[in-house]
Image (cartoon, helix red, strand yellow):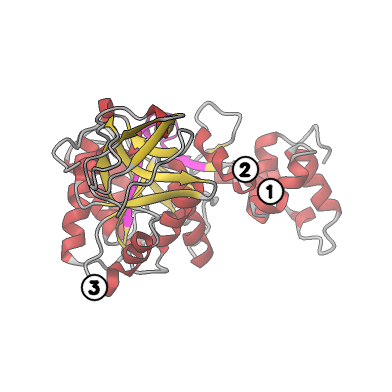
Amino acid sequence: MTSHALSERAARAALTAHFAPSQLAAELAEYTPAEVWERRVRGDGSGRLSLYRPHEELAQAELTCPLVIPSDEEWPTALTDLGPACPLGLWVRGRERLPRLTDSAVAVTGNRAPTAQAVRRAHDFAAALAKADHTVTATLANGIDATAHRAAAATGRATLAVLPRGLDGAHPHAHAPLLSSILDSGGAAVSLYRPGTAASGATLKDSAVLLAALAQAVILVEALDHAEAIYAAEAAVDLRRPLLAAPATGDVRSSGNARLLDEQLAVNSQDPQLALALPHARVARAADIADGDLILAAVGEHGADYFTTPYTARPETFDPSCGRGVCCLVTEPGAVVVLSNGDPWDACDPWPADERLLIVPSQQRTDRHLKG
C-alpha cells in the first residue's frame, strides 16, 4: 500500500498498535505517519507487519470508539508536553466532551487499598474540585480513584476516566457500571490502547503518565511507594504540573507521600481549598511577586523545590537587623524587600530578582483561611 493511499489516522493507529511513541519520534520528525509505517513494514523481517491491515483494523476498532489524533479539534494540546513520548493517537468514548473536560482537569489518585482516612480525603478533595468546576480525572481503579469519580458524580459534575486497557471494557471489570455512569452523565473515557487490549503492568504505568499529562494539577491522596499512583505523581514532577501530596500518616500505605514530601517534590496539604488553587499556579519572577500571592516552591533548572508549608507574600521594607529569619528578595541593586513574616529559614538570605517561584496569584486564591 502506497503512502498516499494510507490515511494518517489509519497509519497512526497501526503504529500505535505495534510501537511506543518514543521508538518512532526520530522518524516522525522526518516522515509522515504513513511513510513511517511503510518503512517499518519494509524493514520487518518477521513479516508480521505486512500481514496487518491498517484500514480494516481501524474500522473494526472504531466500532467501539474513535481514535482522536493531533489534527483533530478534540486533541488535548497538553499532551505535547510529553515530547517524544506524546501519543500518536488517543482512543476516546465521549469524544465531543473531551475539550471541555480536559480544559479544567485535575487528577486525583492514590492507593487501590487505601486507609479509611484516605478515602475521606479523596472524597473531600474530589467533591471540592467538582463544585469549583474542575474536572476530576482518575483511573477508575479501586480505592482512591473510584472514590474520586463517585464523589464528583455526587455533585452532579462529569468526570474523565483514564483507562489502562481498551475502552471495550473497564478495569477492574467490576467497575463496568461506574464507567457506564461516567459516560451517561456527560463524562468521557480515554485510553492509549485500542479496544480489545487487556491491562498489564506496562499499560498501568503508561496510563498513569497519561493521567498526569492530561491534568492541570495532580493530587496524590495516599500512595504506597512504587504503587501505580506514584507513576502519575512522578510524571507530574517531570512535566512540571503542580503536585499536592496529602500529609503522610505514618502508615506504610502513605510511604510514597512521605518520600515525595521529604524530597520537596510536592506541596504538603490536607486542605481541599489549596487543591482548588493549584490549577491556577504559575511561575513568576521573584521581583514580580505581589502582596497576597501564595508561594509554593522555588523553581530551578530541574523543576520545583516545594516549601514545607506554602506561605503568603507580604512585601515590606527589609530590615537586616530584624532577626526574624524571613525570606528576603533583592528587587533591584541596593533595594531589598521582605516577602513573608513567617519563619521558613534560619536567617535572611536575599534572592536575586530573576529567581523563579511557583505561585498562586492572590486574585486566584480560594484558600484564604490557610495560614500564610
**Image quarter (top left, top right, bottom left or bottom right) of the C terminus:** top left
Instruction: Give the residue displayed 30% in from the left and 36% down from the top.
Output: 339
**Dot 1, how many residues are within 10 Å of its Cα: few (below 14), some (14-19), or many (20+)?**
many
Residue 97 counted in the magenta span: yes
Please tell me which residue lies in front, 132 or 24: 132
The residue carrying mark 1 is 15
Tag 3, which secondary structure?
A: loop
Around disc 3, counting alpha carbons within 10 Å, would you say few (fewer than 14), some (14 to 19), or many (20 or more)? few
- The answer to which of 64 and 298 lies nearer the viewer is 298
Q: In this view, does 273 lie above or below 197?
A: above
Identify which residue, 309 or 82, lies in the foreground: 309
Tell me: 308 left or right of 215: left
Mark closest to the chain's N terminus, 3 or 2 = 2
Q: Where is residue 349 in the image (x, y as percent from the top left)?
A: 38, 46
Q: Which amino acid does label 3 sit on?
A: Asp
The residue that label 3 is drawn on is: 251
Determine contact: label 3, label 2, CB under 8 Å.
no
Front-most of residues 211 and 82: 82
What residue is drawn where x is 36% and y is 53%? 266
Where is mark 2, residue-wise? Answer: 88
What is the secondary structure assignment of the residue under circle 1? helix
Task: Give the image location of residue 218, x and y in percent.
Answer: 36, 48
What amino acid type should be assigned to the residue bearing mark 1?
Leu
139 on left or right of 23? left
Which numbered disc, 2 or 1, marks the residue that appears first in the sequence? Answer: 1
Mark 3 to mark 1: distance in Å?
43 Å
Q: Are marks 2 and 1 in contact (CB under 8 Å)?
A: yes
Residue range (magenta): 91-109
Foreground tag (3 vs 2): 3
